Image (cartoon, coloured by chain):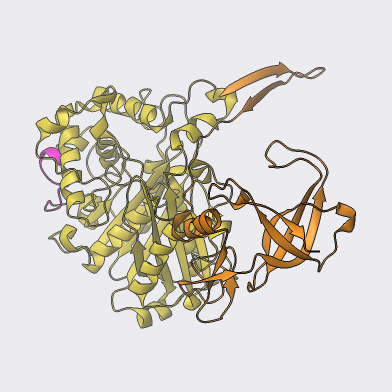
Amino acid sequence: MPNRVAIVGIGQTYHKSKRPDVSQPEMVAEAVRAALADAQLSIQDVEAVFSANMETFEAIYLPDHGMAAEVGAFGKPGFKVNTGGTTGGSVVAEGFYMVASGLFDIAMVIGFEKQDCGDTTAAITAAVTPIWGKGAATGAIGEFAKQALSYIETSGATEEHAAMIRLKADRNACRNPYAHLKLGLKSVDEILQSAYLVWPLRILDFCPQSCGACALIFASEQRAKKITKKPVWIADVEVVHQEPFRAGVFGDPTGKETYTQHVACERLYKRNGISNPRKDIDMAEIYEPSNWEEMNLYEHFHFCEKGEGWKLIEKGITEIEGEFPVNCSGGVIATNPIGATPVIRVAEAALQIRGDAGEHQAPKDIKTAIATALGGPNWTVLVLLKRSL
Amino acid sequence: MSTVTEKLEGMDVWLYHGQIYIPNTYSAGAVGSKFLIELRDRKRIVGTRCPTCNRVYVPARSICKDCYSQLDEWVEVSNKGTLLTYTVCNQQNAIQPVEAPIVYGIIQLDGADTGFVHLLGEVDPEQLKVGMRVQAVFKKEREASILDIKYFKPLV
């Protein structure tokens, strides 16, 4: 049995398109200091530091090397991970493994991305393998336009449903002091007037490029109970990777592909006795680069039956006041500092469990939450959090 | 991405040759910008002093790597220093700012506790010696770049 691991410190920067006022190391230090302050620990208490960043996105070689001082990693064990969109989920898994193994009592994980440095889409499309991807790489927008089209074709969802999801995200983001896009959207009609990036994906249907960082401090059971009265336990972590499949990575018109979400959920739900996720879990923070993908993920995570994701938003089930709130933070469609994004999902889910989410706290009592990460060729990381084990 | 493909002679394999283009913009941030503006406007080399360990970092850093103190105290250090080590590069590369032979040195400026990596000039590579005294030579036209210091030359 692994040792129990708790989140004892949570810190994030505010998120914006551009942060010329700080260098990349200075920006990341803001999140580290916030997490240390939240845990009331000093950097000397932290035994190991693990970081997450998609370095090609900022056109900087090994950015973690240049910020060892700023993130408190100098003289300590730890290393950076880089797994695409799931990068921040991978670092949470990494920190969990390290403390669960008993090797470290207190470890920090940091996700960061300063997207004003580089050109993410250029990196994704330029650095693709030329053997199969030559001339065919569209970047994330093209991938999720394909997904949206597949979803429309197979589920019967309409653009109005996508707009309802977008409206929910914006209402929540407007209540979250750290969110990037706070648009004050008023109606579904307003969203349906947004221009198409690539049909059927509108500008408002897709996430922004954000600068930001998020740090979490993990502690072993013995230490966690001394550090905080409100530890958030990492009950379980599941990671499922795969290579790209040709049918469409995020939506599969052939109907023959295995989704990593299904594999991950089967394992995680089984291990934790979850038979009805919408009842057994109180809320979710999911990695949804677009509103269309959010509906798709409802189905993949078994929050509803196949083809019924859009019904959850139609019935208001996933609203912050709903029966099963999803992305009370405003989600990825409001804020996407890529390497930090999945770490923020875990941070926001943990804040909900602590009851410390402030204006975007769900009204229902959140005792169990799931945070997810998605990226690359549809990799999946799941993190199950609990108030008590 | 532009690629050129090639059938490898004598083997049944196919190669792609290409170049990757990724635009980028990097902010020097709060501390780096102040350092560079001092170079450009006043030809001054500045660092930050750690209030806990008293170490002076040049170039300036925002945080002490040893004790994690926030470094807010700015100090000007001398434009003269001591050569701690060096190397000579005889092969030209497109990314290097000057022609070969290029002399790189690590210089401890008077008043600093750290090494400062930069170029050496007006020096015969044969004359280089660890411990020699050097002085910064500033460019006439400065643009808030680390290369506003043209190079360090031996003090005679």
Name the residue nearer the viewer: A303 or B96: B96
Instruction: Indicate yes or no whether the magenta region holds residue A281.
Output: no
Q: In the image, which residues are magenta? A: A313-322
Side (left or right) of A298 relative to A376: left
- Residue A81 visible in the current orientation: yes
Q: With respect to residue B85, does A157 lie above or below?
A: above
Q: How many marks?
A: 0
**Rendering coords of residue A359 (x, y %):** 16, 60
Residue at 34% in and 60% down: A12
Q: Residue A23 location, x and y as percent?
A: 46, 55
Chain with colour yellow in the figure? A
Name the residue nearer the viewer: A55 or A4.
A55
| Residue B41 vertical position relative to residue A232 in the rendered view, above or below | above
- Residue drawn at x 40%, y 37% as measured from the top left: A259
B25 sits to left or right of A331: right
B33 to B63, vertically: above or below: above
* Residue A388 located left or right of residue A26: left
Write down the quadrant of residue B16 in the picture: top right
Q: Main secondary structure of the magenta part?
A: loop
Residue closest to the eye, A122 or A370: A122
Q: Is residue A270 visible?
A: no
Q: Position of residue A194 (x, y in %)?
A: 19, 28
Residue at 47%, 61% (x, y): give it: B31
Drawing shade for chain B: orange
Quadrant containing the C terminus of chain A is bottom left
Instruction: Provide residue A250's location: percent of width, then percent of height.
Output: 37, 32
Q: State the image quarter where residue A295 is shown.
A: top left
